[in-house]
Image (spheres, rainbow, N blue to C red):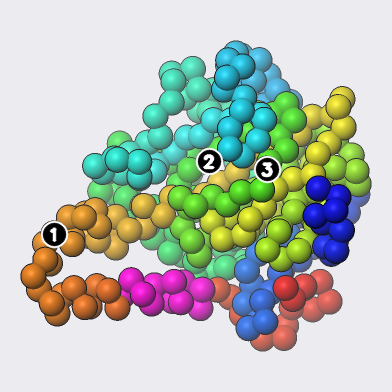
């Protein structure tokens, strides 16, 4: 790892107390990610500490089996809830979890610590990527109206994201990966929690941008996790790191764009209609560009805190 990142730049997400959000912008001045830090509010810091303590209690209650600890993202326990679509589903539905996990998440997400964290991430998303945030809100609103059984993780005002994952650790250090099932040009909110020294470990590594980002407990970062390969630097043996992530599956957006149908159903319907097939191919080929171009542009107004990547 040390050799692989020897020539990376180091950025600070949050100082020892708090920080203003710091956008990462591309050469076209588009905001592609934001290092959100945390609010300048001691109560908020205490709430993030409460969230870590609640995760630790929940991990003990859930009694994960050893084989549940290892996955492609790393050696830690995790669970996910919320509306999703993919993996052979015929219609969008809530992620399937055990009754115990469902009860734990309902308890956790009713706590002030979690809906404050979700609300802070939502505010960052709305401020720094307003068009994409609005698209997330519209799609989730549409889905929950059409399918009343879909359960939001939080009230509408607190989160535009459909799904959430809690990485229960106790040492949540992810391997290099992308989240390929998320919306390609969408954002994922990641909040670091726990008790670890952020000067020595827990950093977020964005491999494609050659960045190492100091990521203290209680801080939030939003990135296009389906695009950027990311991981964490390890923490000490006696330290604990958890994370709370929010995101939306790409399949939900496709389902709504297709008029509540799968890609296969649409393609079967227009089979033999050359004009309709050409129109669909054109729309699909430009969707990526339209998504990227909907990112907020700073137009030179990013200030000294912005970073061009």
Q: Measured from the top left, where is residue 133 in percent x and y?
A: 50, 63
Separation of residues labelled 3 and 2 (CA atoms): 19 Å
Please tell me whether residue 288 belongs to the stretch shown in magenta: yes
Please tell me whether residue 274 belongs to the stretch shown in magenta: no
Separation of residues labelled 3 and 1 (CA atoms): 39 Å
Q: Which residues are magenta?
A: 283-294
Q: Measured from the top left, where is residue 33 in percent x and y?
A: 65, 64
Q: Residue furthest front?
A: 3
Residue 45 in view, yes or no: no
Q: Residues within 10 Å of mark 2 (few under 14, many from 20)?
A: many
Query: Taking 244 as reference, is 207 above or below it?
Result: below
Name the residue beneath numbered marker 1.
268
Query: Taking 132 as reference, is 69 above or below it?
Result: above
Q: Closer to the N terminus: mark 3 or mark 1?
A: 3
Image quarter of residue 232: top right
Q: Closer to the N terminus: mark 3 or mark 2?
A: 2
Q: Residues within 10 Å of mark 3 (few under 14, many from 20)?
A: some
Helix, strand or loop at label 2? It is: strand
Q: Measured from the top left, where is residue 215 in percent x and y?
A: 79, 49
Name the residue beneath numbered marker 2.
164
Look at the numbered discs 3 and 2 and tell me whether their residues touch, using CB distance below 8 Å. no
Q: Nearer the viewer, residue 220 or 186?
A: 186
Image quarter of residue 20: bottom right
Query: Taking 117 as reference, is 70 above or below it?
Result: above
Query: Tag on residue 175?
Result: 3
């Amino acid at each position: 790892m040390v050799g692989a990142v020897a020539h990376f730049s180091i950025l600070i997400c949050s100082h020892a107390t708090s920080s203003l959000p710091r956008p990462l912008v591309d050469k076209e001045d588009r905001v592609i990610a934001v290092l959100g830090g945390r609010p300048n509010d001691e109560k908020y810091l205490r709430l993030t500490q409460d969230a870590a303590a609640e995760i630790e209690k929940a991990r003990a209650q859930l009694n994960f089996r050893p084989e549940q600890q290892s996955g492609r993202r790393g050696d830690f326990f995790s669970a996910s809830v919320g509306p999703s679509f993919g993996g052979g589903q015929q219609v969008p539905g809530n992620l399937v979890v055990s009754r115990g996990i469902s009860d734990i998440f309902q308890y956790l997400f009713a706590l002030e610590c979690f809906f404050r964290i979700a609300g802070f991430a939502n505010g960052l998303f709305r401020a720094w990527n307003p068009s994409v945030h609005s698209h997330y809100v519209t799609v989730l609103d549409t889905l929950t109206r059409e399918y009343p059984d879909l359960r939001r993780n939080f009230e509408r005002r607190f989160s535009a994201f459909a799904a959430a994952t809690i990485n229960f650790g106790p040492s949540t250090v992810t391997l290099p990966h992308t989240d390929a099932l998320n919306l390609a040009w969408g954002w994922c909110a990641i909040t670091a929690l726990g008790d670890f020294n952020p000067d020595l470990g827990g950093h977020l590594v964005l491999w494609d941008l050659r960045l190492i980002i100091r990521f203290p407990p209680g801080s939030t970062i939003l990135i296009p996790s389906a695009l950027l390969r990311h991981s964490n630097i390890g923490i000490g043996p006696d330290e604990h790191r958890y994370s709370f992530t929010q995101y939306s599956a790409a399949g939900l957006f496709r389902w709504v764009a297709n008029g509540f149908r799968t890609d296969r159903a649409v393609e079967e319907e227009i089979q033999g209609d050359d004009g309709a097939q050409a129109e669909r191919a054109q729309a699909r080929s430009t969707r990526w560009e339209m998504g990227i171009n909907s990112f907020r542009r700073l137009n030179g107004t990013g200030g000294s805190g912005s970073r061009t990547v």
